[in-house]
Image: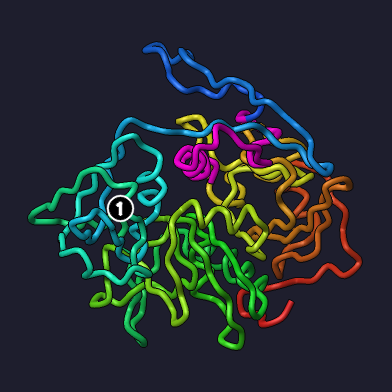
């Protein structure tokens, strides 16, 4: 999100801006590796960010990004340079067009001036310097994700039961009319378990609001993907937009709920899910051996400071208080509070109304 806004700001002539994203992490403190030496030591590390406080919240200063050239892929252009993207292909292309001294756009088709209705143009000609009509386009799909026809049985994979247990419980967090963002990985599966009695508007960072299920095999479209690069469908009333617009929705507080996978979470809601040692990858929130994911303090570099409100695992559900810490509110049926204590790397309070849940539960 910060990258998208840095590019957008560069194209708008804004040299820098303040954002709360990254405060309390290596982004703010500096020292994150940018380049390594051949022996594995850090050759170049990031610099600390300037910090200011607005209305009781801390923000860091981010400088805008511009370039000499922007190489952009679009769908169609007219001979004047007005361009149109197809479905989710706007992503970073749209702000990139505006942030370079010279913008070169490759399109599938060039049409005569006047062929586009003015209101259909995504990037006006003032931002485009050169046009190129490509040939023999091959639109590769990075992650082909399809759903089985109704009645067909999906093949189970190792770990599916645990993932399904987590995500079925997470799907109970949805409320009717809610706007929700689903992070890459297991959270994306939540769309398959939304109650048919409610309407949830799913948003994806690459630029779509109104995500539907994975496509059937004959519905696959390489220009329609989610932020995880998986093929998707959209529901009636959906819309497409650029990545800077997408993250502005989130930053502006217009999205009601975000679900993310986590490598580690602290008792006060710190999140670590972006940087790990090469030899150490941990699955979503479940315990592997004696490795705890819910800790007194995260040992991995933080993604966000005190940004988690609820933790859902395959064993338990915790509410997070930024000052008091964790409160256990639900446990998986058949488990005890002692089982949860053994799997948790910090202390926690226990709610007087702690419930047991299962994937078959319709109400917790």
Residue 210 counted in the magenta span: no
Local SS, label 1: helix
> Percent from the top left, x then y, of residue 32?
55, 24
Q: Is residue 125 left or right of residue 192?
A: left
> Is 85 drawn above or below residue 174 in the view shown?
above
- How dense is the environment of label 1, judged by Cα within 10 Å: few (below 14), some, or many (20 and up)? some
The residue labelled by disc 1 is: 125
Residue range in magenta is 1-27
Q: Residue at x 30, y 72 (%)?
A: 117
Residue 292 can be seen in this image: no
Q: Residue at x 42, y 47 (%)?
A: 95
Which corner quadrant holds the C terminus? bottom right
> Percent from the top left, x then y, of residue 36?
42, 17
> Percent from the top left, x then y, of residue 24?
71, 33
> Is 180 drawn above or below residue 65 in the view shown?
below
| Quarter holding residue 60 | top right
Residue 7 counted in the magenta span: yes
- Viewer-closest of 91 and 63: 63
Q: Residue at x 55, y 32 (%)?
A: 15
């Amino acid at each position: 999100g910060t990258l998208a806004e840095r590019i957008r700001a560069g194209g708008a002539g804004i040299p820098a801006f303040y954002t709360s994203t990254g405060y309390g992490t290596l982004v703010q403190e500096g020292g994150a590796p940018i380049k390594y030496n051949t022996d594995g030591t850090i050759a170049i590390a990031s610099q600390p960010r300037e910090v200011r406080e607005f209305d009781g919240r801390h923000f860091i200063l981010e400088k805008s990004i511009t370039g000499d050239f922007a190489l952009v892929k679009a769908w169609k252009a007219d001979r004047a340079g007005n361009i149109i993207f197809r479905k989710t292909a706007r992503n970073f292309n749209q702000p990139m067009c505006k942030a370079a001294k010279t913008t070169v756009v490759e399109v599938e088709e060039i049409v005569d001036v006047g062929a586009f209705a003015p209101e259909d143009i995504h990037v006006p000609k003032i931002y485009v310097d050169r046009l190129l009509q490509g040939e023999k386009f091959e639109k590769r799909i990075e992650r082909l994700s399809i759903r089985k026809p109704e009645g067909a049985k999906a093949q189970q994979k190792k770990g599916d039961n645990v993932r399904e247990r987590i995500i079925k419980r997470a799907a109970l967090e949805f409320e009717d009319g809610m706007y929700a963002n689903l992070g890459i990985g297991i959270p994306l599966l939540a769309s398959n378990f939304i109650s048919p009695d409610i309407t949830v508007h799913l948003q994806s960072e690459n630029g779509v609001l109104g995500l539907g299920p994975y496509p059937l095999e004959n519905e696959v479209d390489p220009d329609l993907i989610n932020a995880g690069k998986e093929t998707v469908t959209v529901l009636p009333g959906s819309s497409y937009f650029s990545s800077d617009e997408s993250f502005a929705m989130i930053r502006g507080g217009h999205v009601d709920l975000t679900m993310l996978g986590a490598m580690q979470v602290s008792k006060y809601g710190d999140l670590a899910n972006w940087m790990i040692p090469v030899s150490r990858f941990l699955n979503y929130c479940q315990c592997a051996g004696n490795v705890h994911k819910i800790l007194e303090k995260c040992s991995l570099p933080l993604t966000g400071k005190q940004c988690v409100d609820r933790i859902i695992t395959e064993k338990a559900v915790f509410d997070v208080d930024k000052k008091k810490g964790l409160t256990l509110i639900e446990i998986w049926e058949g488990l005890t509070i002692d089982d949860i204590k053994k799997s948790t790397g910090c202390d926690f309070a226990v709610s007087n109304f702690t419930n047991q849940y299962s994937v078959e539960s319709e109400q917790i």
